[in-house]
Amino acid sequence: AAPKAAANPAASAGGRVVASPLAKKMATEMGVDISTVAGSGPGGRITAGDVQKAASGGGAPAKKAAAPSKPSWTPAAGVVAATPTARALAKKAKIDLATIEGTGEFGRVTADDIKIATGEMKPKRKIAAPGAPAVVELPEGLVPFTGMQRAVSNNMVATMGCPVFRASREIEMDAFNALYRSVKPKGVTVSALLAKAVAKAIEKHPIVNSSFREEGTFFNKDINVAMAVAIDGGLITPVLKYANERDVLELGENWKELVGKAKSGTLSPDEYNSGTFTISNMGMFGVSQFDAILPAGQGGILAVAGTQEHIVPCKQAVLGMKKISKMTVTLTCDHRQIYGADAALFLKTLNDVMMNPQQLM
């Protein structure tokens, strides 16, 4: 018996598909491209069964129409494809064309590719894909300083030649927070209470309220606590003068007035230039610890961070543990007249004042 013909796509030498009349009719009705069906009949003839299998997915898959091929060009070995302008720019900038990835047709290096490589031109931003989040437009270019920003910048630079050191300590805040809750309805702010507490600690350690002079240490008789305030376009330090001598209600009213003037730009020079000690408070932003830059002409600045809860041992508690609130403060000092022991003792006293805040009233 003759061997069975192998199943091959059926086509005559002239390109005519070899199939039975029934197979052709079924292919038309079932939407099957008969030229893609492999025939199993004699000589590769396509039968009705072959068409049925192809329609149900059992036959050979339909061929996808080949995408039109893009024209291509490959430069000779060792030759970098580049436009004449790109070559001239690369030669002028002393750039090796072989190091540049071309973005032009056929991968040619273009003039823009050279300008991007030299920094003369910025790369084009890729267009976001459909459905992708919108691109956030960020500020770009130089924005000149305002007069206030220039003054802040100059003051910061002026302190860079001062030898400083920093000391940090955790302060227990439960009693202080309780006092604040009781006086808040009366208009007293945290800033006013902090200024009063710091001023009381300075009374016992006046060295941190001093300033350096070439001849020696200059002690300031008054305790004027400056408080850093961020305003639109800059930073300013309104001053609570004689903070140790005034009660917290008066300090609270004065502070509200000073903040209002700061935001409206109506502070007098004496209201922001007369500080002898500064507080920078970023606790409201959730900052856990930071250092502050010492203002020119002062001996100390206290950086106040946010309050955080801690679990500590407690013999009186049922489970032997209790929850307390603490905040970290960092004192930056002029090391020319203030020493480490001075800072440590001041912070210890401040902690005592904050834990027994009734003396602030």
Image (tube, rainbow, N blue to C red):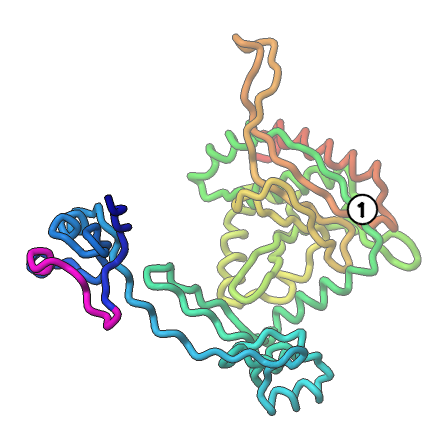
20 in the magenta segment: yes
Residue 273, how many percent across, how many down?
67, 62
- Return the residue found at the far right: 215
Q: Residues within 10 Å of mark 1 (few under 14, many from 20)?
A: some
Residue 94 image offset from top left, x and y in percent: 73, 83
Residue at left 59%, top 76%? 142
Name the quadrant containing residue 14: bottom left
| Coordinates of residue 165 in the picture (x, y in percent) | 80, 46
At a point 68% along the width and 38% down the height, the residue shown is 200
Relative placement, left or right, of 308 versus 340 is left
Identify which amino acid the numbered label 1 is placed on: Phe
Which of 245 and 11 lies nearest the eye of the viewer? 11
Q: Is residue 29 left or right of residue 160?
A: left
Question: Which residue is labeled 1 in the image?
Answer: 165
Percent x, y for residue 228?
Answer: 61, 54
Is there any visible trace of residue 33 in the rendered image? no
Stretch of the chain drawn in magenta: 13-24
The one of 236 and 78 positioned closer to us in this rendering: 78
Dividing the picture into quadrants, the one containing residue 161 is: bottom right
Q: 162 or 209: nearer the eye?
A: 162
Q: Is mark 1 on a helix, strand or loop?
A: strand
